[in-house]
Amino acid sequence: MPLVIQKFGGSSVADTHHIFNVAKKITDVYKSGNDVVAVVSAQGDTTDKLQQLMEEITDEASKREKDVLLSSGEQVSSSLLAMAVQKLGFPAVSLTGWQAGFLTESNHTDARIIKIDTKRIENELKNKNIVIVAGFQGIDENGDITTLGRGGSDTSAVALAAALNADICKIYTDVDGVYTADPRSVVSAKKWSSLSYDTMFEMAHFGAQVLNERSIETAKKFGVTVEVLSSLSDNLSGTVITKETKAITNTISGISLKNHLAKVTVSARDNTEKHKNLITSEMDKTGIKIDSSMKPVGKQNKDIFNFIVEENHINDFLAVTKKIGIENQNIQISYEKNKSEISVINISESLNLNTASIIFETLSEMNIDVEMVACDEKRVSVVVASECANSAVNAIHSKLFEEDMII
Amino acid sequence: MPLVIQKFGGSSVADTHHIFNVAKKITDVYKSGNDVVAVVSAQGDTTDKLQQLMEEITDEASKREKDVLLSSGEQVSSSLLAMAVQKLGFPAVSLTGWQAGFLTESNHTDARIIKIDTKRIENELKNKNIVIVAGFQGIDENGDITTLGRGGSDTSAVALAAALNADICKIYTDVDGVYTADPRSVVSAKKWSSLSYDTMFEMAHFGAQVLNERSIETAKKFGVTVEVLSSLSDNLSGTVITKETKAITNTISGISLKNHLAKVTVSARDNTEKHKNLITSEMDKTGIKIDSSMKPVGKQNKDIFNFIVEENHINDFLAVTKKIGIENQNIQISYEKNKSEISVINISESLNLNTASIIFETLSEMNIDVEMVACDEKRVSVVVASECANSAVNAIHSKLFEEDMII
């Protein structure tokens, strides 16, 4: 019997109405003669609420305890969803991460899955149960609860699809597929019917929030066919992510946007390169993500270097530089918030010079200042002030896609 | 090193302020040179909120899924409490029911503990960790999450004390001990410094909410010394529950009160005894608790019999009588809500005739109608209208205790 994995995010199960909507999507697939395993995130703003409770207690909670706390959210949503499926008259059983057999590394709050012991799930499927799995979580070899980091439920679903050799992994979200740009801000964005793993990875890496990067890596590694589709509409066809397809080689596949970035500027009178390396390695050690691939545009001062850091990590960044004593060495660190990174994804180096010139020309016509730029065989990225980002994305999209639409 | 088990109920961890208050009680005991295992209930009204979520989905949730849902509450409170203990500068680790080794029967929502595998807890204690255990929960032999029923965290704590051979099990609650009557309604109630297991059991059975019955049975079975004390005040001495003590033999030990009861009246023209037995056995099968020990006072009609049923079980009671076809047999069932049962606990039959007459005399003087009565070697109970219950308890307490106080 075909096996379908379905994954539903937090907004899809935010309240009773949404939960029954999801229960219907699950039972429809079951009624069509499939085995079904559904992976579910915590309801709506549950995770935020739990974080608030935590922050009232401490601003330096141990990651182990944080995982115990946050994983309760999916335990709640999975049991409620199982109740709703039962209410519709179908047999269902919810399983937490450890019950579903997710063994992970011990790296709390961002653990990687080591393997999935699928015995319990297979038994439940044999008994014709619809299995509802709490996403985002597992246990390590000590029996401690772990979580998989941001977007972890996507990874749970794709890894389960691989372990169970499922026919397809359907990721339900609040858009009905993957677009050439975010359809909420670019009205003329077009939906792809299919995309390669590599292209999807780049789009996710540079800001498309429809699927997380780790889940795409996992899908590629195990050849899992993933479909991104809407949990709200009944439009059945989404975007299928699969192996390289001819149609999308050497083609610009989309425009991604990352907001809430800060541009950090470090002025060092001497040993500039040494300090840059020191900061990079320390941030790597402490897990603070910095982007040093972006280069300034225009005349450059060799005593100055820049990093792009997510706004909500800027305090951590400054705490680390303070701790390693950077500030005692005649070095000044400043930052500007409200920066955005626009990336055009284009798995073909040969096309990128042309793409870059189109981007610069478009932004120049709009009088938008390009503050930083990065260009490689997979993308062209520019950093602009966030207030210009949406109009810039729309203009670039219009230039690249609407005159000579390939889809 | 001495081992102390501490148990904190939901109101004791209701918010951040209360959590830190509890964390301080825990670390004080730890600082005094004890190993500490704390058992914690879900925060304040968490369980009610989860029940509400469930009832929005279905009024007939499977008990298995209900246990998955409700057990998340203690997972949250245990991790928050561990964070607070850490914030105070002490090492702590939270454990869910399954991590703490609680193996139970499969009887979801009211499972009994079979055994506790204490290996994990002992390892944590060896590493000098303060262990915070999520109360009320365990797993069955299938690896499914179970809960222990009302007051289950008390049972978790006492069973842990037995399994770990702890020196004492301290139950922190919103009163600072066990009183001759509920001190919230009887101002002159006096606190016992110690009570026997048997007396405490009777007091709990007949309404004292300070400890649940199953935990007292467990304490008696394994000889666990239990102390009931306040989580709010710093008054250190509570009430110690232990083996029979001389001081409290042949003594009235307290007045318990049960509210929210319904008096069910069944009128059967024939086969009265047969129907009574049928109803009793069916309620037993379906787990609906009825009290048939209470007898009407005054002239009795042999075609009529009564049960005392908790108000929130009255609909279930009627559903069962309907299902077994009782109503088709010339039988009428009616009920009155807002009844209360007052019990005077007195582990000595010889004293009870005198006690009964004092109770009747007191209520008669107050013009309070005694609707039903039960009397055995452990207690004298009367059923009265709830609106009279508090004044009745106060008057009886005054007669029995205040003139010739034994404590």
Image (tube, coloured by chain):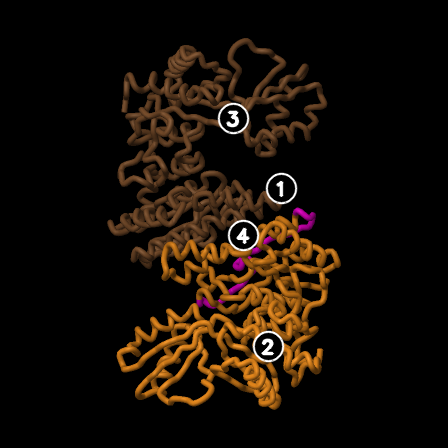
Chain colours: A orange, B brown
Residue A76 is tagged as 4
Q: Please tell me if label 3 and label 2 are on a single chain.
A: no
Query: Mark 4: which secondary structure?
Result: helix
Residue A16 is tagged as none
Q: CA distance from mark 4 to mark 2?
A: 36 Å
Q: CA distance from mark 1 to mark 4?
A: 17 Å
Residue B189 in the image, given as x and y percentages of width and height: 32, 25
Q: Chain of mark 2?
A: A
Q: Amino acid type of disc 3? A: Leu
Give neighbour class at mark 2: few <14, some 14-19, many 20+ (Cα, 10 Å): many
Instruction: Name the residue carrying label 3.
Output: B261
The mark closer to the camera, 4 or 2, is 2
Q: Are marks 4 and 3 in contact (CB under 8 Å)?
A: no
Instruction: Name the residue carrying label 2.
Output: A255
Q: Amino acid type of disc 4? A: Val
Q: CA distance from mark 2 to mark 1?
A: 48 Å
Q: Amino acid type of disc 2? A: Ile
Q: Amino acid type of disc 1? A: Glu
Q: Are marks 4 and 2 in contact (CB under 8 Å)?
A: no
